[in-house]
Image (spheres, helix red, strand yellow):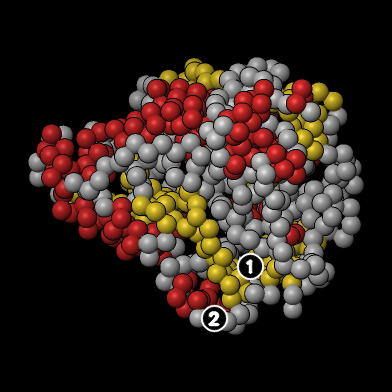
Amino acid sequence: MADKLHPIIKLAGRDFADGKLDRREFLRIATLLGIATPVAFGMAGLPMPAMAQGAPKKGGIVRLGSRVQDLKSPHTYSWVESANAARQTLDYLTYTGIDNVTRPNLVAKWEPSPDLKTWTLTLRRDVTWRKDNRKLTADDVVWNIKRVLDPKTGSSVVGLLKGFILDEYETGEKDDKGVAKKSTRLWDANAVQKVDDFTIRLNGKAANLGIPEALFHYPLMIMDPAENGEFKVGSNGTGAFDMVELDVGKRARFAARKSGHWGGGAHIDTFEIIDLGDDAAAQVAALASKQVDMIYQGAVTTYDTVQKMPNVQINSIDTAYTAVARVHSLKPFDDKRVRQALRHATDPDAVLKLAYRGLGKPGEHHHVSSVHPEYANVGYMKQDIAKAKALLAEAGYPNGIDTEIIARPQPDWELLAVQAMVEQWKEAGIRARINVMPSAQYWNVWTKVPFGFTTWAHRPLGTMVHSLAYRTGGAWNESNWSNAEFDKLITEAEGYLDVEKRRAVMAKLERIMLDEGPIVVPLWRSVFNYSDKKIKGYKIHPTIYIEAKDMWVDA
């Protein structure tokens, strides 16, 4: 077996034996490089995780309290809630579990080249589409991957994989300021290659350690090409459920596929998502009255109440979930000293306690959490009001600045965090008026508001966050921030499986963010939700993904 191992696994094995690499990171590297999960756990000396909740029972219904959104375009989703609906019908090529280990899903295995530039994906041969029972083939997968990488689609996958497989070019057009417009395209005609009916090869221009994890990015669902990227009631899929009802803002209902599902199908008969709105008290009332069996995400204002409910369990996990106060480079924030002043005027410890009951860790004003394997402790801008005032004066604002920050009223902690920061900023002369915008309205304009507070979900790698949120030209680069050196370093970091090499590059990225970046990061939060104790087979995912097929009801 040793002769067949990827050379990086051999190196990781030596580092593991020498105590330079911990078990979890070795496990992650081994599985990413194609070692089957049970074998990788054995190599790391770890037991396979188990639910240990008894034998699953068949039948019944699970009702989730969550927003029911427009689900028409999965490849452009920017809400986890949307993905939690569509993922019941549509599958992913891979799956990253609650333990941060990525496993095969629609693919049976993957094989990276020694230089990590080429990834060969081998599909399972037992996957069929629900409607016509035809097999999932490489043609289906190639169509999906090319579609999400087409800038005309508008998918965030472009930002995630830009350094790996895309080139940027000038379109020949100019914007209203006379600046040349740019777009992206596959760097090579053979970048996404069909090898045979069940094999796809991704031929990148640069090394990328996280392709299996990127394939689980939540908009990268595998859709039937015949439906041209549109998802609706009755849509085809390879998943365990068929969407049989969708009433946006009210209800979505999914019926279990009766037979032919490659994963063995669902335990329950029906999965429903019921829109309870954003009011946390109303959500808990629905859980108490058994209108729903689970709440997608808990609220700090209801935590104490739910702790006293005998039939309800609180599920929680430490994550890289956060929200960032981010600015566009418009006056006065076009001067990096003003952006630095915002960070120096913020006390993350106080915001964490005031807004989130201390359930998490204080932010460090760069978008890499200590739960990320490549996190580097470079220190951060602690609250220093005098320094903030001095920076504003140097930037030409000796009397401070007046501005407006847009925030959402729900979830409750976000507005509490903004209110806490606004009070802190006042001391430095940063006078910010809070514009509370309904969530639905905010998400229609979230990349356009000059100064906003935006929630960001957990990702297993810090490099993924940087690619999505800060790489030049990315669909989710909400601050429109652009730094050529930052872009170059992201691509470099993506090429290192060696966590120490990646951490060294990440330290540079973090320092650039502290010096020039457009964000204030007040906290990293533990996420939690609520479920009736009769629901089994469920453990909370750090990105709060809901896989209804794994649940069963112990009535």
Q: Position of residue 345 (x, y in %)?
A: 22, 48
Q: Are marks 2 and 1 in contact (CB under 8 Å)?
A: no
Q: Which residue is mark 1?
A: 64
Mark 2 element type: loop
Q: In percent of the image, x 34 and y 43: which residue is there?
A: 365
Q: Looking at the image, is mark 2 or mark 1 nearer the viewer?
A: 2
> Relative to 283, is 145 above or below?
above
User: In the rendered view of the protein, which quadrant contains the N terminus?
Assistant: top right
Res 312 quadrant in image:
bottom right
N-terminal of the pair, mark 2 or mark 1, is 1
Res 13 quadrant in image:
top right
Q: In percent of the image, x 17 and y 43: which residue is there?
A: 388
Q: Amino acid at mark 1?
A: Leu
Q: In percent of the image, x 18 and y 46: which residue is there?
A: 384
> Relative to 127, is 438 above or below?
below
- Mark carried by residue 309: 2
Left or right? Give the position of 294 relative to 258. left
Q: Amino acid at mark 2?
A: Met
Would residue 175 be seen by someone viewing this image from the given angle?
no
Spatial distance from mark 2 to mark 1, Cα to Cα? 18 Å
> Relative to 369, is 297 above or below?
below
Q: How many marks?
A: 2
Res 353 quadrant in image:
bottom left
Q: Position of residue 23 (x, y in %)?
A: 60, 41
